[in-house]
Structure formats: C-alpha cells, structure tokens
Amino acid sequence: MNKKIKRLIEEIKSYNTDLYRHDFLLTWEKSIDELKSILSIADLLKEMRRDNISAKVFDSGLGVSLFRDNSTRTRFSYASACNMLGLAVQDLDEGKSQIAHGETVRETANMISFLSEVIGIRDDMYLGAGNAYMREVGEALDDGYKQGVLPQRPAIVNLQCDIDHPTQAMADLAWLKEHFGGLDNLRGKKIAMTWAYSPSYGKPLSVPQGIIGLMTRFGMEVSLAHPEGYNLIPDVMDVAAKNAELSGGKFSVSNSMDEAFKGADIVYPKSWAPYAVMGKRTELLRANDHDGLKALEKECLANNAKHKDWECTEEKMKLTKNGKALYMHCLPADITDVSCKAGEVAASVFERYRIETYKEAGYKPYVIAAMMLTSRFANVPEILAAQIEKSRKRIKF
C-alpha cells in the first residue's frame, strides 16, 4: 500500500460524517466534513485506478439511471462509476416504460428498485420540479422499504436538477483542490462565475448555482456576474451569501464581466437562461404550448444577442491575476469560430486550457462513485482498505 493511499484512508477515517443511507441531492445540505470525505474518497478511488486496484465492492446489483435531458459527460461518468464499483447499469427510458401510459412515480420507483443499489436522476428541464421529483422518488422508496416491498432502500444521486448540479460542482472542486494543492489553498482565491453569450437559450441555472453554493463553503471570493435580468434563483443566492459569511469568504454580484474577471484566480464563463425565462418556459412546456415556446425562444435569443461582448476573450483574460487565471467549464463550451460563430469563449483561450477542462471533467466518475459508496456503506475506508489488501496479495502471488 503506497503512502498516498495510506494517507487518504486515514484522512477519510478522520471525518465526522452522516452520509450512510442518505441521498445526495444538494451540496449545501451536507456538512464540510461530508464534502471533504467525498473528495478524499474520490482521490482514493482515482489512486486505486491508477494502480490497477479493483474497487468492485458489489458482487451484484443495479445502478439505475434516469436522464430527462441530453448528457454525455454525466451519463458516461455515472456508468463508469457503477462499473468501477461492480454494479450493472440500467437506463430507464420513460418513453419505453409504463410511465408513458401513466404509471405513478410511487409505482415506478418501487418497480425499478428490487435489486437496485443506486438511482441516478437528471431532471433539469422544469424549474421548481427537478429536485422536487427526486424527493418524491425518495419518499416512495422510503415507503416501499418500510412496507417490506423492497429488501433495501436504494440511494438517490442528483445528476443535475433545476437547483443544483452537485456531481459537476464537486468534480470542479476536486479539480481545484488538485490544481492549487489542497482545499486550504483555495481560501481567499477569487473565482469569477459569469454569464457568457451563447447562440442557444434555455440552458439550466444549476451549474452557476452549484458553483456559488459550493465554493462559498470553502472561504473563496465568489464573484457572480451577469447582464441585467439574467438572475439566478433568489433562494440559492441567499444560500451563497450565508455560506460566504460562515466560511469567511466573500460573495458579490455585479453586471460587469470585466469587474468579475479583475484579479480573478479562476474564471468560469458559462451561459444560462434567466430565472424568469426558465419559469415561463416551464409553464409553456407543461401546457405543451409549442407556439409559445417558439416565441419565447425568439425573444430570448434576441436578448442574448445584445450581450455578445460577454465572451471570455484574450483581452478579458489579461484582467485576471497576472493574466493567468485558470479557465473552467462544465463542457461542452460554445467556442467562437469552432462550435458556433460567436460564443462563450474565444478559440485561443479554450485551446490553451482544453486539457485542464478535460482533467476537470475526469473527476466526475470518481465523485459519483464516492457518493454511491458513502450512501451504501457505513465503513467506506475499511471496505476500500480490504479491496486494496486483497488486490495486493493477488498481484504479489
């Protein structure tokens, strides 16, 4: 067992957590120790993978996935996490299930859970509904377990909702931890979470909300910037402000991308739809009002086009600390003259940080696996230590 693995195991043991048999739905519902534990377990799993040590702690069982929106990184990260731990992946296609014929949430939740360990849900399309749906599924599972329908209650992992994107935000934090050499080194660092122009509309609020809700927990100076009217959910803004006060960090809001970039150590330019627009869009989607949706899209794209100067350019990067801030993005980025005529980031800036964004994304499978492990096992460090010892003996033999 190498020194880093030993250190990580002892580190995980030192945290005071209550993650066992609990869902992971919002980062701000978890304690600092619990968030640190997830990061350390992710680091340990990554180290085990690097040393070709199996982390298959499950002999059988399903990891069910339900994606109500398109996904590449999160979908494959979830599947990778399940495979890493020994679970088979079963994707729930609502169009091919009895959900399409009116099956209730309560019934579906129980029917997919007889041999399931984890259910990963992505539901970010409907403002006010995604996180609520996950909790409704959780209540159905609680009842199914209580009534003896289910032999055990599967855990739910939020793979993105209307409020938060915890697996993305935690992967981002894991990357920052590596890049800056530890969580303590993030204290006082300025991160600019800014809106950026995109030739599309309706992008969820959950990525910027996840960033301001998490980075404020670790004493960072979080500078949120967006054009007037491109507000986030007020309740999440309140969470970020409170977090900053408790952690000794800072949280500010402005309508200037340049102001946010000034002196920043990290920049995260990312498009999103205004809170009010997402609310209106949700109403139109529920009403199946196609004409209304087309009119809203036209209006929103016209508004976006007024802010094409909200682009992460070389000139804006010069405003950052020593002109060398770390560029971050959840991907895919709208890259000017590459994926679109005008977008979130200049091609030269993105290309310079392309590998860094891939490394950032590379933490997601390990973060998801850590969330799964902590929800299913009370003694994760001992479980993984046994896996490491078993693997070491096998290799030695």
Image: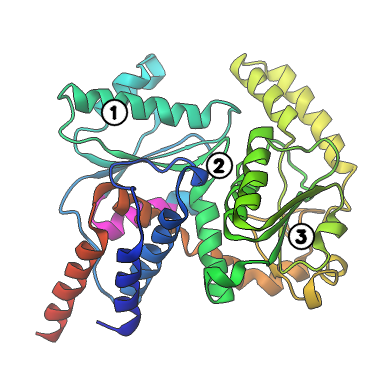
Q: Nearer the viewer, residue 343 or 279?
A: 279
Chief secondary structure of the magenta portion: helix
Image position of 106 (left or right of 193): left
> Crowding near pointer 3: few (<14 within 10 Å), some, many (20+)?
many
Q: Identify the secondary structure beneath mark 3.
A: loop
Q: Which amino acid is tagged 3? A: Val
Q: Which amino acid is tagged 1? A: Leu
Q: Identify the secondary structure beneath mark 2.
A: loop
Q: Nearer the viewer, residue 347 or 220?
A: 220
Q: Which residues are magenta?
A: 76-87
Which residue position is annotated with label 1? Answer: 141
Q: Residue 42: where, in percent of width, then height? A: 39, 63
Comparing labels 1 and 3, the label whose residue is closer to the camera: 1
Which residue position is annotated with label 2? Answer: 164
Which residue position is annotated with label 3? Answer: 345
> Residue at the location (66% across, 39% down)?
238
